[in-house]
Amino acid sequence: MRTKSLKKNKINVVTLGCSKNVYDSEVLMGQLRANNKEVAHEEEGNVVVINTCGFIANAKEESVNTILEYVQRKEAGDVDKVFVTGCLSERYKPDLEKEIPNVDAYFGTTDLPNLLKALGADYKHELIGERLTTTPKNYAYLKIAEGCDRPCSFCAIPLMRGKHRSTPIEDLVKEAEKLAANGVKELILIAQDLTYYGLDLYKKRNLAELLQALAQVEGIEWIRLHYAFPTGFPMDVLEVMRNEPKICNYIDIPLQHISDNILKSMRRGTTQAKTTKLLQDFRAAVPEMAIRTTLIVGYPGETKEDFETLKQWVRDMRFERLGCFTYSHEENTHAYQLEDDVPEDVKQERANAIMEIQSQISWELNQEKIGKTFRCIIDRKEGNHFIGRTEFDSPDVDNEVLIDATKHYVKIGDFTNIKITDASDYDLFGEPV
């Protein structure tokens, strides 16, 4: 008998992809811990669960490579079992079973009870909201809904996550209270589409009411909104943001493109004029707001003119935060019927051109912050710097505030007032006051 398999069963959960996957891994780990299983996140363990992403080509490649890596380790006797769950597994299970048969079992996105059973654990219904968080202790993701009803032509998420399903307000409040009791001060609200929240349960868009309920939770000081859809945006959310100090003046609203031709082909249900007016309304209602968006370049049929329109619009809008992706041709999506006619090198050139414009805008906006003082949350220490964020910045994707740890001490997990002394394209430098 191999001595390696005699060690105590320790389950290593490996998370790939977005914050929604992070949340799902945390729920899985909470359930395993409640079943008295030894569980770790991205550490060594003799049983491995890989939570995959299947959104676009790069993510799929990373997921497949990770599966192959652990299968090789299994064949070498370094791990005993490999299980695969998440979006890639939901979308391509039959293909994966055929191509990588040495995985012990594949599970989809809604297969948690079966996955637990395979790991020798029971699904505990009473654990709603119990999670083993993997983020720094001061913030946590709160998934308010699952799935999506939008018909966007390029997106495979409904194939992997199903129809939109909102979580009831009382369950989310209970979960927020548990997180706050564990020291969480910032909630980052996530869903495929926040603005659809409540339509299925309450027959109306109910994000504003949810925000008001979460703002009552003691210990929670910041609430941040991610992934709002522009079409049918519930404007009462802006009123809550303006009047409730706990709601960060921040919104992540993926707009994808602005040329009317492309928006129509993408099935976004909006136009350049409507989108521009929506953003003007945002700025009028909450002048302090930081708007983050993401764009896709190289979509089928994107002409030079379409791209020039997009570039000019990015210059005009001066987004505080912006990310840009190249189009990925995904089977079983509506856009897959179109010819993927923009060459890869052109897609990349276009993405680089957008990010160059944005980096200049970001630099200019950051220069305006020098000399001002911001309330920052301190996430971690890295090398000789403490790393914090303003309310206008989300973890991992936005600007950070660097504080020289050789000169100043700030407590990780606490809020501190930081005076900005210098700024680069994407980072601020400051000292506590």
Image (spheres, grey):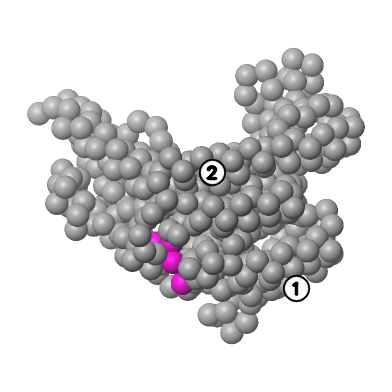
**Residue 182, percent from left and from top:** 62, 47
Q: CA distance from mark 1 to mark 2?
A: 34 Å
Query: Which residue is situated farthest in the left direction here?
Result: 1
Where does label 2 land, which residue?
351
Viewer-closest of 213 and 319: 319
Residue type pointed to by label 2? Ala
**Residue 226, percent from left and from top:** 61, 56
- Residue at position x 67%, y 42% in the image: 358
Residue type pointed to by label 1? Asp
Q: Is residue 153 above or below residue 382?
A: below
- Residue at position x 62%, y 70% in the image: 271
Q: Specify start and end residues of the magenta stretch as a single range.
A: 151-156
Q: Is residue 153 magenta?
A: yes
Instruction: Tell me the tag on residue 236.
Output: 1
**Residue 28, percent from left and from top:** 40, 52
**Magenta segment, prevailing SS (helix, strand or loop):** loop
Q: Residues within 10 Å of mark 2 (few under 14, many from 20)?
A: many
Closer to the chain start, of discs 1 and 2, is 1
- Residue at position x 73%, y 19% in the image: 405
Q: Quadrant of residue 172?
A: bottom right
- Residue at position x 61%, y 52% in the image: 308
Instruction: Tell me the tag on residue 295.
Output: none
